Image: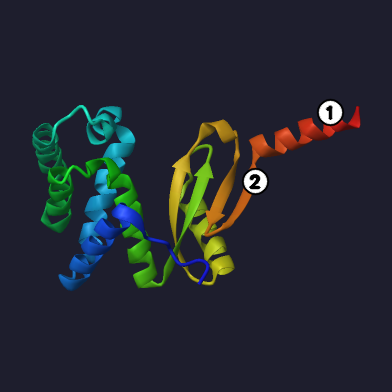
Amino acid sequence: MADEPIVSGMAGRYATALFELALEERALDSVKSDLDRFDELLEGSADLVRLVRSPVFGAEEQEKALAAILDKAKIGGLAGKFLRLITQKRRLFAVREMIRAFRALVSKHKGETRAEVVVAEPLKDAHLEALKAAIAETAGKNVQLDVKIDPSILGGLKVKLGSRMVDASLKTKLNSIRLAMKEAR
């Protein structure tokens, strides 16, 4: 199928191994929850991103720092072991790709599809549910939303579902009007 997630490369292999182990141990939801929490930590900390991405830090430094972060965030179990393992194997730089691939595998397993939504400001729960229902109706499947906040779009939203993208952002509409006005001269 065209909309099946493609999980390949080094990150895909690690994600697949984790997925199979989590499935075997009936821990898919807890592993996904822990990985989502770690991804949120990455999203909110430039220092953590630097620790993860920079080759300047040695494996031992990364392991010590990661252990403290995992303890503080209460990320343990299979996800904690996985994060420690990829740190030891010097693969921590690819953790976000691994998390993305793991989410895709979980979604496929559950018969869900994921949609990326970009909005200018956080949505209220009622609006989020309405958007989720509208996208689910279009997709014909249960939909999980990955919502990103980008004030530069000014208003409206962008939705990416598989290979389809709808850009209803105010910024794009204003740029279209500006282009049309230039052509009219």
Q: Is residue 169 above or below residue 101?
A: above
Q: Residue at x 29, y 38 (%)?
A: 42
Q: Write down the residue under mark 1.
A: 182
Instruction: Check disc 2 and give the amino acid type.
Output: Ala
Question: Is label 2 or label 1 in front?
Answer: 1
- Residue that lies at the very extreme toward the right in this rendered image: 185
| Image position of 160 (left or right of 72) | right
- Place of residue 78 in the rendered image (x, y in percent of width and height, measured from the top left): 14, 58
Which color scheme did the rendering employ for the protein? rainbow
Q: Is residue 47 above or below residue 69?
A: above
User: Label 1 crowding class (10 Å Cα cut-off): few <14, some 14-19, many 20+?
Assistant: few
Q: Which mark is residue 164?
A: none
Q: Write down the residue under mark 2.
A: 168
**Which quadrant would residue 65 be assigned to in this image?**
top left
Q: Is residue 29 above or below residue 96?
A: below
Instruction: Looking at the image, tell me whether mark 2 or mark 1 is earlier in sequence order.
Output: 2
Instruction: Identify the secondary structure beneath mark 2.
Output: strand
- Place of residue 119 in the rendered image (x, y in percent of width and height, measured from the top left): 53, 42
